Image: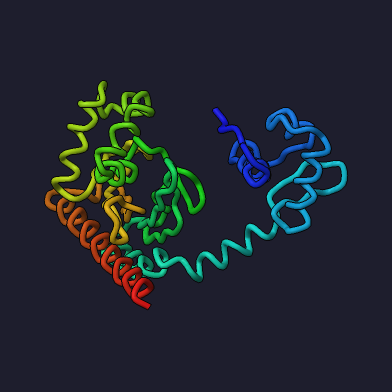
C-alpha cells in the first residue's frame, strides 16, 4: 500500500518512487491513475523532474528515469564511506575464495546491494547492485534484522510475519525471535540455497557506531565448495570483515564529529 504524500516535496518524490524493476516506464495517464494527481499538478512535477534530469522521455512515449540518476550514482561511489571502507574486503574475500562478495545497505525496511565483486566463473548472486533483496529470505536480511534493538525488531517482525513464515524461519513472532538469537550468538547468518539454489550465503552486520546495523557484508559461494570446516572459516572471515569495516566507519564518524 502506497503511503499518501502530504506535502509538495513528498508528492514530487512520489513520482520517482513509482519506478520499479517491474514498471520501468510510465505514461502520464498511468501516473495520474497511480498517484491520484490532477493533470496540471502531475505535468508541473514532470516538468521539474525532467528539467533537472531525473526523468527523461521521447515524443509520444512514457517517462523513464533520467541521466541525473546516473550522475548521482557516480558521486555516491566517490563519497560513500561504506563503499570506500568495504572495497578492500571485497577484494580480500574474493581472493581467498571462489565466491561473490557483497556490500548491502539497509535503509527504511529495504536491503539493497551497493557494491559487489566476484571471483567465481559465474557471479553467484541473484541481486546485482541496485536491486532490492528479500528481507526474511537468505543470510543478508537476517544478519541485519537479528541485530536490531528489540524495540525496532518486534514491530518489524509483526508487520512482516507472513514473509518469515514463507521463508520457514518461524510461524510466530517468538519463534522468529528465537531463530534470530543464534545469529546474534555466532555474529553472522548462514543460509543454504534460500535465495539461489545450490548457493550458500554468509553475512554479518556492519555498524557505524550506532546501536543498529546500517549494512551487511556477505559472501555467496557454491555449496560444493563448502565442505568440512570451510563453512566455519568463511563465517569467521565474513564476521571479521564486517567488524573491521564497522570500526573504520566509526572512526570516520568520530573524526567528523570532532572537527
Q: Position of residue 95 (x, y in %)?
A: 31, 67
Q: Nearer the viewer, residue 4 or 112?
A: 4
Question: In the rendered image, which quarter is residue 174 located in?
Answer: top left
Q: Nearer the viewer, residue 156 or 168?
A: 156
Q: Residue at x 79, y 32 (%)?
A: 38
Q: Is residue 73 left or right of residue 89?
A: right
The residue at the far top in this view is 171
Q: Position of residue 125 (x, y in %)?
A: 41, 48
Q: Is residue 258 left or right of residue 181?
A: right
Q: Quadrant of the N terminus?
A: top right
Position of 190 relative to 137 (above/below):
below
Q: Residue at x 27, y 59 (%)?
A: 242
Position of 96 relative to 202 (above/below):
below
Q: Residue at x 49, y 69 (%)?
A: 79
Q: Position of residue 164 (x, y in %)?
A: 32, 28
The residue at the far right in this view is 59
Q: Quadrant of the C terminus?
A: bottom left
Position of 2 relative to 246 (above/below):
above
Q: Tell me which colouring the rendered structure shows.
A: rainbow
Position of 111 relative to 94 (above/below):
above
Q: Residue at x 34, y 26 (%)?
A: 161
Q: Is residue 43 left or right of residue 78?
A: right
Question: In the rendered image, which quarter is residue 160 located in?
Answer: top left
Q: Position of residue 185 (x, y in %)?
A: 13, 46
Amino acid at each position: 500500500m502506497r503511503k499518501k504524500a502530504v506535502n509538495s516535496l513528498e508528492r514530487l518524490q512520489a513520482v520517482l518512487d513509482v519506478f520499479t524493476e517491474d514498471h520501468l516506464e510510465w505514461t502520464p495517464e498511468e501516473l495520474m491513475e497511480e498517484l491520484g494527481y490532477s493533470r496540471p499538478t502531475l505535468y508541473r512535477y514532470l516538468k521539474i523532474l525532467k528539467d533537472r534530469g531525473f526523468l527523461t522521455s521521447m515524443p509520444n512515449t512514457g517517462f523513464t528515469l533520467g541521466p541525473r540518476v546516473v550522475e548521482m550514482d557516480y558521486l555516491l561511489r566517490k563519497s560513500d564511506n561504506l563503499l570506500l571502507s568495504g572495497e578492500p574486503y571485497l577484494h580480500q574475500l574474493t581472493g581467498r575464495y571462489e565466491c561473490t562478495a557483497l556490500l548491502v545497505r539497509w535503509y527504511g525496511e529495504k536491503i539493497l546491494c551497493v557494491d559487489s565483486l566476484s571471483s567465481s566463473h559465474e557471479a553467484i548472486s541473484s541481486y546485482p547492485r541496485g536491486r532490492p533483496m528479500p528481507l526474511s529470505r537468505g543470510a543478508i536480511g537476517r544478519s541485519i534484522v537479528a541485530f536490531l534493538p528489540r524495540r525496532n525488531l518486534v514491530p518489524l517482525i509483526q508487520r512482516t510475519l507472513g514473509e518469515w513464515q514463507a521463508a520457514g524461519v518461524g510461524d510466530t513472532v517468538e519463534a522468529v525471535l528465537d531463530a534470530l538469537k543464534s545469529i546474534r550468538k555466532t555474529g553472522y547468518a548462514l543460509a543454504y540455497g534460500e535465495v539461489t539454489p545450490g548457493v550458500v550465503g554468509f553475512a554479518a552486520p556492519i555498524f557505524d557506531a550506532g546501536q543498529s546495523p546500517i549494512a551487511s557484508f556477505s559472501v555467496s559461494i557454491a555449496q560444493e565448495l563448502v565442505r568440512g570446516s570451510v563453512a566455519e572459516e568463511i563465517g569467521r572471515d565474513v564476521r571479521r570483515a564486517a567488524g573491521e569495516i564497522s570500526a573504520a566507519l566509526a572512526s570516520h564518524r568520530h573524526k567528523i564529529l570532532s572537527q
